[in-house]
Image: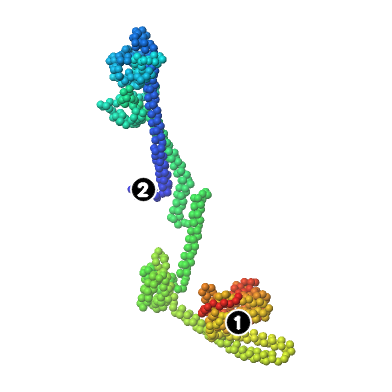
Amino acid sequence: MFKALKQWLFSSIRRQVVALLTISALVYAGLHWQIEQKVLFPQFVLLQETEAKQDMQRIVSLIDHELTSVSQKVADWAAWDDTYEYVIDHNPDYEESNLLLESLIHMQINMLAIFDLEGQLIWGQGCNWRQEMPLSLDILAQGQLSPDHQLLQHQSPDDAINGILECPQGHMLFSAMPIVTSERTGPSRGTLMMGRFLDRECIDQWSQELSVPFSLEKWDEQAPPPILSEIHRTTSQAQISLRYTPHGYITAYQQLPDLEKQNNLFIQAVIPATILSRGITAMRFSTFSIFIVGGLLLLTMYAGLHWTLLGRLRHFSQHFHDIAQKNDLSKRIRVSQADEMSHLQSSFNSMLHNLEQSDRALRASEETYRQIFNTVQDCLFVLNSKGVILAANPSARDLFDLNQAGQNTQEMTTLISPMSQSDFELFMEQTLNTGQSSQELSLICTSHQTLNVRALGRQTHMLEQTCILMILRDIEEHREIALTLQQAREDARKAQAAKSGLLRNVTHEMRSPLNHILGFCTLLGDDALDPTHEEYLSHIRSSSEELMAMVNSIIDISRIETGDLVLEMSQHPLDSLIHDIETIARTKAQNKGLECELICDKALPDTLVTDPQRLLQCLKVVIDNAVKFTPTGVIKIKIYSQPHDHPTQLCLAIIDQGPGLPTQAQGELLEAFTQADTRVNRSYGGLGTGLAVTQGLIQMLGGTIHIESQPGQGTTVILSIPLTEVSSPLDLPI
C-alpha cells in the first residue's frame, strides 16, 4: 500500500508540490500549536493563577476588614468610662440605655459580653440581628470563664484578642479587649467581647460584593475530605492552594487559623478560569486562523506555481511526449515570457534545433556511408561474433552470389575454402580479442574458383551487438603492384648510382686540368711579370681554386650519396681544434675587414673522438658563408657543451650579421645545388653545395646542423657533434 502510494505520489511533480505544501502547512501549524502550548499556555496559566490568588487575597482582606470593624467597636466600648463604671456598680441605667438588643442589631453584632477579672459574666446577650431576635450562645450560657482563660489574658490596656472563634452555632469573628478608662489607663476591670457569625448569608453577601463565590470549610480529623486532607498536609498557612476543575473553574484553598491556632478552617473559593479559558480560545482561534490562512496561502502558492511553473511544465512535458510519439524534431514550444522557465524553453528549442541539424547530418552521414559501403570495390562483410553474415556490400554479393534476404542466416565459413577454415577461426579469435587482425584466406567465389585475399578485420559495435567489419582485398593485384614498385626502386637506385658514378668520373677528370692550371700559375708567379700580367694571373689562380673547391664538393656529395666516403675517427685534442678554428675565422674575417670574436665555455672536455679534417671542412664552409654574407660587423663563434652537468654534445655556433633568411628558406638551404635566393648566385657566386656537404659530413659524425635566422637579424648556424669520450675539463681563457 505504501509503495503504491509512494509511486503514485512521485509520478507527478504537481502531486509532490501539493504534498510538500500540505506537509509544510501541517508542520507549521503543529509547531505553532506546540509553541503556544509550551510558551503561551503557561503564561495564561500563570495569569489565571495570579488572578485566583488575588481573589483569595481579596477574600482574606475582606474578612480581616470585617474583623477589624468588630475590633474597633470593641475598642470603643471597652475604653468607655461608663462601661468602666458599669463593671463596678452594675448601673441599671447603663443597661437600659446601652445594653439593648437594638444596639446589637444596629451594630450587626451576634454577641456582646462583659466579664470581670474573675471570669464572671456581668452581662451578655446573643442576637440574630438579621431576624432581630435573641440568640442563645454557649459561651454566655456558662455564665463564667476560668480566670486563666485565654480570652481574659491581656498584657496591656491596648492588648486585643482578635480572630475567629469556633462555636457550636458556627464560626464567629471575635474580638476581646480589657475594660479601661477612656485615657487607656488601668487598672483593667474586666474584658469586653463582641462577635459576628460568618454565616451563609454573610458569606453570600461578601461573595456578591467580591464577585467571587467562596465558603468556609472545616477539616474534620475524624472524617476529613480528601482534598482538605491533602491541603492540610502540604500547604502552610500563608500559601494558597489551587485546584483545576474539569468545568472551567479553579478552586482556591487557604487556611484560616482560629483563636486556638488550629488550622482546621479553610476558605474555599470557586473562581471561573476566565483568563485560561479565553487564552485557550485565543490559541485555538490562532491555530484555526493558521489553518485558514495557511490553506489560502497554499491555494495562492499552488495557483502561482501552476501559473508560473507547474502548468508550463505540464505543457512542456506534453510537448516532449508529442515529439517522442511522432518523432518530429521540427516542433517548437512557444515562448511567451522572459523568466527562467522561458530560458529553459528557449534552450529546449535550441536543443531541438541542434538535434534536428544533427539528425539531418546523421542521416546524411548514414547515406554517405551507405553509398561508400555500396560503391567500394573491395568486398565488405559485417559478421557477428559467431561468424554469421549480417550485411554485405554489392561487390561481395555479386562475387559470392549472396542475396539480401539470406544474409542474416548464412555463415561466413560456407564461403571459406576447406584449407583456410583454421585461418578464419584464428582471424575471428584475434579480432574479438585484440580489436583488429589481418589474415590471408582462400575463398570460393560464384564461379567455384579459389580466390586468395587478404582479410582485414576490425571489431566494432553496430546493430546493437559486437560485430566484425571484414574487408577482403585481392592479394594477386597487390603482389603485382608491389613487384612493380620494387622494380621501380631498383631502377631508381641504379640510375642514382649511375649518376653518382658519372658525376664522380667527370669531376675526377676535371681535377687533372685544374691541377695543371694551378701548377702553371705557380710557375708563372715565380717569373717577373708586369703588374697587368700579375693581376691576370691572380684572377686565373683564384678562379681555378674556386672551381677546384666546387669539384671537391661535388665529389664529396657523390661519395656521401654512394656511401664511399670513409671517416678517419681519432681522439683529437680540443684545444688544438679550437686554435685551428680561431686561425681560420680570424684570417677570413680580417681579409674582408671584419672582426672575429671567439667565446668558449670555462669548462670543456680535453679531447673528443672525431675526424678533425672533416670537422674543419664543415666549419670552413659555415665560416666562409658567415664572412661572405656579412658586409660589416662582427663574426662570433661560440663553443659550449650540453647539457652542462653531464656533457654529451659539443656545440659550435657561428653567428653572422648578414641579411638573414626567411623560415621557409632555411630547410631548402641544406639541399644540394640549392640557394635561398637566385640573386645570391649572381652576387656571391657558388653552386649551393657547401651546406649540403656539411650536413652530410655532420650526420656521418653523428651530429646535427641547425639554422636560426630572421630576415634582417643575421643567421646562426649551430653544429652539434657527440662527445663519445669525455675527460677532465679544459680551462680556456675567454
Give the answer, above or below, for where 30 lies relative to 660: above
- Name of the residue lying farthest toward the front: 187
Image quadrant assignment for residue 125: top left
Give the quadrant of the C terminus. bottom right
Tally of marks: 2
x%, y% of residue 475? 44, 78
Circle 2 sits on which residue? 5
Q: Is residue 54 left or right of residue 546?
A: left
x%, y% of residue 616? 59, 82
* Mark 2 residue element: helix
* Mark 1 residue element: helix
x%, y% of residue 579? 60, 81
Q: For the point 43% across and 40% down, which residue is it?
A: 295
Q: For the point 39% across and 77% down, which residue is it?
A: 442
Give the answer, above or below, for where 540 lies relative to 167: below
Q: Residue 93 shows which numbered tag?
A: none
- The 10 Å Cα crowd at callout 2, few under 14, some 14 to 19, many 20 or more, is few
- Name of the residue lying farthest toward the top: 93
Query: Label 2 is placed on what type of residue?
Result: Leu
Q: Is residue 434 visible in the rendered structure shown here?
A: yes
Q: Residue 580 shows which numbered tag?
A: 1
Query: Label 1 is placed on what type of residue?
Result: Asp
